[in-house]
Image (tube, helix red, strand yellow):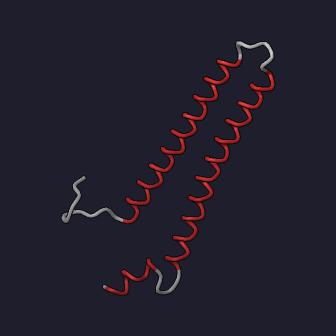
């Protein structure tokens, strides 16, 4: 897809790219957290008195993954709601381009 003056990306294309990249960052972060948790579990499982440590590693990893994923989807939903609200208002961003034509 050519870029530059001959073809500018549309607002929809930009939003799709932002959503995909944001989701990719969340997935990469979740994988990194899971990998560190697995490494910690592998190192701690060799010790006989490590049950409390293993539980704390698992609960911390679960909390971090859940928090990051929930934050992404919460921010994304709020952003989508705000954008659709602005486009529906008289004189909003969606109507400004129609008035200029």
Apparent side of residue 92 relative to residue 51 in the rendered image (left or right): left
Residue sitting at x 65%, y 18%: 43
Question: In the rendered image of this protein, does residue 85 appear above or below residue 18?
Answer: below
The image position of residue 3, as x and y in percent, is: 23, 58
Residue sitting at x 76%, y 26%: 53
Question: In the rendered image of this protein, does residue 74 appear above or below residue 68?
Answer: below
User: Based on the displayed image, in which of its 4 quarters is residue 35 positioned?
Assistant: top right
Q: How many marks?
A: 0
Apparent side of residue 85 relative to residue 52 in the rendered image (left or right): left
Residue sitting at x 44%, y 77%: 94
Question: In the rendered image of this protein, does residue 85 appear above or below residue 35?
Answer: below
List the single residue furthest toward the left.
6
Residue sitting at x 51%, y 39%: 28
Apparent side of residue 53 relative to residue 97 in the rendered image (left or right): right
The image position of residue 76, as x and y in percent, is: 56, 58
The C terminus - image quarter: bottom left
The image position of residue 65, as x and y in percent, is: 64, 41
Question: In the rendered image of this protein, does residue 78 appear above or below residue 37?
Answer: below
The image position of residue 81, as x and y in percent, is: 58, 68
């Amino acid at each position: 897809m050519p870029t530059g003056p001959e073809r500018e990306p549309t607002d929809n294309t930009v939003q799709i790219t932002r959503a995909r990249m944001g989701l990719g960052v969340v997935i990469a972060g979740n994988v990194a957290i899971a990998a560190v948790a697995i490494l910690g579990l592998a190192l701690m499982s060799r010790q006989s008195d490590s049950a409390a440590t293993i539980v704390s590693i698992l609960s911390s990893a679960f909390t971090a993954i859940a928090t990051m994923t929930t934050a992404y989807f919460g921010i994304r939903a709020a952003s989508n709601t705000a954008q659709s609200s602005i486009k529906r208002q008289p004189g909003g961003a969606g109507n400004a381009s129609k008035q200029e034509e």
